[in-house]
Image: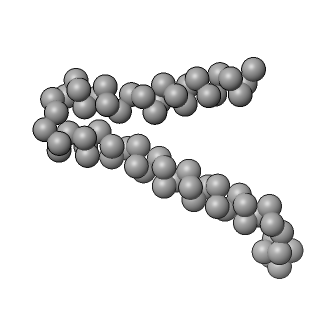
Amino acid sequence: FVLAMKDWKVWCMALAMTSQVTCLSFNAYFPTLSATMGFDTTVTLLLCAPPWGFATIVAFVVSR
């Protein structure tokens, strides 16, 4: 346990995982937040699509 707490890679991974959970929770509630601005369902979903499209492109580029 002490060796794990002294290893910088463990702390880096903990930070990365915490950041991922935070970002995913925002993505889960973003359609609800944008729906409260008065947009209809189609516009709300179109407002939420660009981050997912960007992530798809980045994943494809990184995999290449």
Colour scheme shown:
one colour
**Residue depicted at x 35% and y 33%:** 48
Q: Where is residue 47, by image quadrant?
A: top left
**Residue depicted at x 48% and y 49%:** 23
Q: Position of residue 33 (x, y in %)?
A: 26, 46
Residue extending farthest to the bottom is 2
Labels in figure, total = 0
Q: Position of residue 51 (x, y in %)?
A: 46, 33
Image position of 63 (left or right of 24)? right
Position above or below: 11 against 1: above
Image position of 35 (left or right of 52)? left
Instruction: Quadrant for the C terminus, please.
Output: top right
Position above or below: 37 against 15: above
**Residue depicted at x 72% and y 24%:** 63
Q: Where is residue 43, by image quadrant?
A: top left
Q: Position of residue 27 (x, y in %)?
A: 41, 43
Q: Where is residue 11, by image quadrant?
A: bottom right
Return the residue nearer the eye: 53 or 7. 53
Q: Position of residue 9 (x, y in %)?
A: 80, 61
Position above or below: 23 against 45: below
Image position of 6 (left or right of 58)? right
Image position of 15 (left or right of 49)? right
Instruction: Quadrant for the N terminus, please.
Output: bottom right
Residue extending farthest to the right is 3
